[in-house]
């Protein structure tokens, strides 16, 4: 490759283009085209005489629809914060390895392999109105009435937490254990205790990875659908934006309006990503410069 | 115990009077350090020398407080310190991979320890700048570690430790990530800093040349056991056993049986020949022993009196620049390494003289 590069620029470009072609075609066919087609449909309202943006206008004028953004946000944000914090705590604690590490990691990661439906069924069976947890607490006498942990936003947050935690934990564990352990030793030799080491050495180095993990968990949580239906209250407190889109598409058979809602959902996720990436850039410019040689 | 008070109004470095220890370290069932004894006085430069896995870095980690000892005690100026955490010991440490904080500038790295001591910003600024001058990095304050060369990074690491006026400096193979030329330069710089600032230093290395050039005393370790302690001259000229001799560049080890002793010389039977060596206490006639000699001490050709002359064929020649080193197969089948300025031709048969006073008589292991 080195020879090709020095001999001729265009030859390299040709090779690069050839190598990229299959994946480019895939992305074009499976993502770009459907995405653009969705936007196109959303601009073709069911009612003939309506303007091209009438679906979007209708969405934002209808509080019942428009509030789904807030509802989804209020599910995704607490979930993301909880997932990232717990994963950070555990991954930081396990960064130098602990006893039974493999077993513990397997247990923590297991939910990923189970699938959302199975997970939701499990949550209903354990945390539900007549679930094991309530039966146990009632039997012991700790509570007089069953706790309502499912068919509301708590249930959805539980479910989202279990789905997204393993992914976030693995990502952070890899990131944190990749940080040179002698940095901690040198900080100690300079007089830093454990908390100072975390605050002044480790956290600044973890922050870039933490922010990316936050962004990905947030976007995944924002797209919540099955658990919002199964362990939530899809007609009320957990009527997320994806449910709104689903109802328009398969209950009202208004594909155009449904597409408009899907586009709005995508834009919300994109906006969140942009904000997070901007924050990351402000926070970590020094770090990326510093780790150049590591 | 806090260095901040201990150093107020004192000089560049506040050396210790005495560090004494005897420590054992076990990992699982394996003994990594076996009652490792050490006594260091103030302003001394002591090197732990040994091959990888000999326990030298573990010993340093235990002195630093980063590795808990399994057994034993460490006393500093008569006070026990093995239960004091590393951040309270007031020691400075330089790591093999520099361990600079990548998210902080050179200034931020050197100021790190001072800012933890809540020093005023004027004092921090002054001390950091003084230190940068000392390690010849003035003007690099705002660079990040990733923008520096290896040698510069290691100088920042040294400055970061020295700025706190450590009572004891610990160096964990600080030069082994640098190229050969830079290593020699940095070696001289470390020695200069040590002398100029009146430091007390412990230095870990597997490089005998580094140990010889830097140290007041060398501690040779093997598999967690202390092999020999002495000045560079003692270690270099009078190794106590085959391991130390081998490590210090004796390449020739002749298995001999000792004969009679006369006039300070002892006879040694080697493959049917009688060699003469300088006698040593505690070796007796009839004993089996080892005669060690460096390749550069073996002379080409016959000596005047014909004593200690061996004959052999040149099997291999290595060109070393000013000299050559050759492997000779002796008539009896043994092999001998020779180093000489004279030209040695592959395949020729040579007479070699082994001067009696260059032999080191060692116990067979």
Image: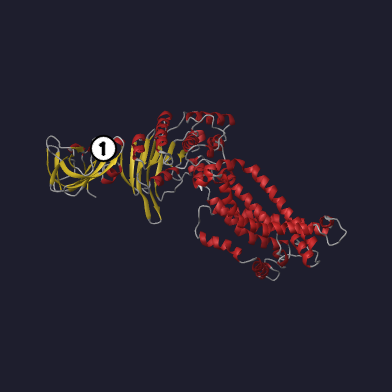
Looking at the image, which is closer to me, B331 or B67?
B331
In this view, B161 is above or below B253: above
Instruction: Name the residue rendered at 49%, 32% in the picture.
Output: B7
Give the left or right position of residue B202, taking residue B88 as reference.
left
Give the left or right position of residue A294, taking residue A69 as reference.
left
Looking at the image, which is closer to me, A30 or B300?
A30
Colour mapping used in the image = secondary structure
In this view, A27 is above or below B61: below
- Residue B231 visible? The answer is no
Neighbor class of circle 1 (other Cα within 10 Å; few <14, some 14-19, many 20+) is some
Q: Quadrant of residue B343?
A: top left
Q: Secondary structure at mark 1?
A: helix
- Residue A164 visible? The answer is yes
Farthest right residue in view: A49
- From the top left corner, tell me how far across and down residue A87 is, in percent: 60, 55
How many labels, in total?
Answer: 1
Q: Check the residue under mark 1 and report the chain it is in.
A: B
Q: Which residue is mark 1?
A: B237
- From the top left corner, tell me how far across and down residue B203 is, in percent: 39, 39
- From the top left corner, tell me how far across and down residue B272 is, in percent: 13, 48
Looking at the image, which is closer to me, B352 or A105?
B352
Give the left or right position of residue B112, taking residue B285 as reference.
right
Q: Quadrant of residue A235?
A: bottom right
- From the top left corner, tell me how far across and down residue A134 is, in percent: 68, 68
Looking at the image, which is closer to me, B205 or B71?
B205
């Amino acid at each position: 490759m080195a020879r090709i590069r020095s001999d001729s620029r265009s030859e390299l470009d040709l090779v690069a283009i050839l190598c990229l072609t299959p994946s480019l075609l895939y992305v074009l066919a499976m993502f770009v085209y459907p995405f653009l087609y969705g936007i196109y449909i959303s601009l073709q309202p069911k009612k003939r005489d309506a303007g091209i943006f009438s679906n979007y206008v209708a969405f934002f004028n209808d509080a019942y629809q428009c509030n789904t953004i807030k509802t989804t946000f209020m599910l995704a944000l607490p979930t993301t914060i909880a997932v990232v914090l717990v994963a950070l705590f555990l991954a930081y604690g396990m960064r130098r390895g602990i006893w039974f590490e493999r077993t513990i990691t397997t247990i923590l990661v297991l939910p990923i392999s189970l699938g959302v439906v199975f997970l939701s069924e499990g949550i209903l069976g354990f945390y539900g109105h007549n679930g094991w947890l309530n039966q146990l607490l009632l039997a012991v006498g700790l509570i007089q009435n069953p706790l309502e942990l499912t068919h509301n936003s708590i249930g959805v947050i539980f479910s989202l937490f279990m789905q997204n935690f393993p992914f976030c934990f693995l990502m952070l564990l890899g990131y944190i254990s990749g940080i040179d352990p002698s940095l901690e030793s040198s900080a100690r030799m300079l007089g830093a205790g454990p908390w100072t080491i975390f605050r002044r050495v480790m956290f600044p180095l973890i922050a870039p990875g933490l922010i990316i993990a936050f962004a990905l968990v947030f976007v995944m949580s924002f797209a919540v659908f099955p658990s919002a239906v199964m362990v939530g209250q899809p007609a009320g407190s957990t009527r997320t934006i994806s449910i709104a889109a689903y109802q328009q598409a398969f209950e009202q058979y208004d594909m155009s309006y449904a597409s408009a809602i899907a586009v709005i959902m995508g834009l919300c996720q994109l906006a969140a990503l942009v904000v997070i990436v901007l924050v990351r850039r402000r926070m970590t410019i020094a770090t990326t410069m510093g780790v150049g040689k590591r | 115990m806090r260095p901040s008070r201990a150093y107020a109004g004192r000089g560049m470095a506040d050396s210790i009077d005495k560090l004494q220890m005897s420590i054992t370290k076990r990992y699982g069932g394996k003994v990594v350090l076996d009652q490792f004894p050490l006594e260091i006085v103030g302003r001394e430069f002591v090197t732990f020398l040994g091959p990888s896995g000999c326990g030298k870095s573990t010993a340093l980690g235990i002195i630093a407080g980063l590795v808990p000892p399994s057994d034993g005690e460490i006393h500093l100026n008569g006070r026990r310190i093995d239960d004091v955490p590393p951040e309270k010991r007031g020691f400075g440490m330089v790591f093999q991979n520099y361990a600079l904080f990548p998210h902080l500038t050179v200034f931020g790295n050197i100021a790190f320890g001072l800012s933890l001591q809540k020093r005023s910003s004027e004092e921090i600024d002054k001390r950091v700048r003084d230190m940068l001058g000392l390690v010849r990095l003035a003007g690099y304050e705002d660079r990040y570690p990733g923008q520096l060369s290896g040698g510069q990074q290691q100088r920042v690491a040294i400055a970061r430790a020295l700025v706190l006026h450590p009572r004891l400096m610990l160096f964990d193979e600080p030069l082994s990530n640098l190229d050969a030329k830079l290593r020699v330069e940095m070696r001289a710089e470390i020695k200069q800093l040590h002398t100029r600032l009146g430091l007390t230093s412990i230095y870990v290395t597997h490089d005998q040349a580094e140990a010889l050039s830097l140290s007041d005393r060398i501690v040779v370790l093997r598999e967690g056991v202390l092999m020999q302690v002495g000045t560079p001259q003692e270690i270099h000229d009078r190794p106590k056993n085959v391991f130390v001799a081998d490590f210090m560049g004796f390449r020739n080890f002749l298995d001999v049986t000792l004969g009679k002793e006369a006039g300070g010389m002892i006879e040694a039977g080697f493959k049917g020949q009688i060699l003469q060596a300088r006698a040593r206490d505690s070796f007796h006639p009839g004993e089996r022993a080892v005669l060690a000699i460096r390749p550069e001490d073996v002379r080409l050709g016959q000596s005047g009196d014909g004593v200690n002359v061996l004959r052999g064929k040149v099997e291999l020649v290595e060109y070393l620049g000013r000299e050559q080193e050759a492997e000779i197969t002796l008539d009896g089948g043994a092999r001998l390494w020779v180093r000489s300025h004279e030209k040695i031709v592959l395949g020729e048969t040579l007479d070699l003289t082994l001067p009696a006073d260059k032999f080191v008589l060692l116990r067979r292991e």
